[in-house]
Image (cartoon, rainbow, N blue to C red):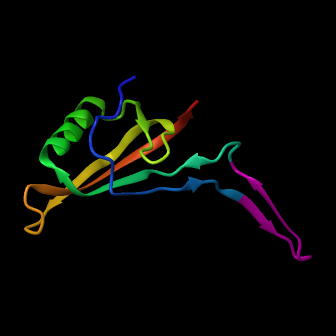
Amino acid sequence: MNVWPDIAAPSSMSGGIFDPLDEANMETGDDAARPRFSVPRQQPMRLEWAAMSYADFDALVAFHANQRSTPFLWVRPRTGVQWEARFVSNAITHSESRDTPGRLAVQCTIQPIRRVE
């Protein structure tokens, strides 16, 4: 399995847990709920770099071109926890600014599939 490229860690990340419940409210005032899935799923993880170098951007784009929907190993930078992940549709966006010459603001979205133990 290929490994996430050796680029600078993102300046911010956001994601979450997808754990829908089947819920019912009764006329008696009781309610009931049960998980829809046996294991909660991860929501897509949005990685953001406020000022990514062009070299790191080129490495990320090349990795995306080679991987696309194929799973890869990704290590969460701040915890060291390993995940099997894949890119989602329209995974990478970027913008340039006069305020940060030679740098790009980059957003990349991946889908964590499962934690690697």
Instruction: Please give left or right for residue 23 compared with residue 78 in the image.
Output: right
Give me the residue at 64% from left, 47% from top.
40
User: Where is residue 32, by image quadrant?
Assistant: bottom right
In the rendered image, which quarter contains the N terminus?
A: top left
Residue situated furthest right in the rendering: 28
Q: In the displayed structure, would residue 50 be above or below residue 53?
A: below
Q: In the displayed structure, would residue 50 be above or below residue 112?
A: below
Residue 18: percent from left, percent from top: 58, 54
Magenta-colored span = 22-36
In the rendered image, which quarter contains the C terminus?
A: top right
Residue 19: percent from left, percent from top: 64, 54
Residue situated furthest top in the rendering: 1
Magenta-colored stretch includes residue 30: yes
Q: In the displayed structure, would residue 104 be above or below residue 65?
A: below
Give me the residue at 15% from left, 40% from top.
58
Give me the residue at 30% from left, 48% from top.
91
Name the residue nearer the viewer: 113 or 81: 81
Instruction: Please give left or right for residue 82 compared with residue 98 in the image.
Output: right
Magenta-colored stretch includes residue 20: no
Name the residue nearer the viewer: 86 or 6: 6
Give me the residue at 79% from left, 66% from top.
24
User: Where is residue 63, by image quadrant?
Assistant: top left
- Principal secondary structure, stretch drawn in magenta: strand
Q: In the displayed structure, would residue 109 be above or below residue 73?
A: below
Instruction: Please give left or right for residue 90 compared with residue 22 in the image.
Output: left
Image label count: 0
Residue 109: percent from left, percent from top: 36, 50
User: Where is residue 2, by image quadrant?
Assistant: top left
Residue 13: percent from left, percent from top: 40, 56
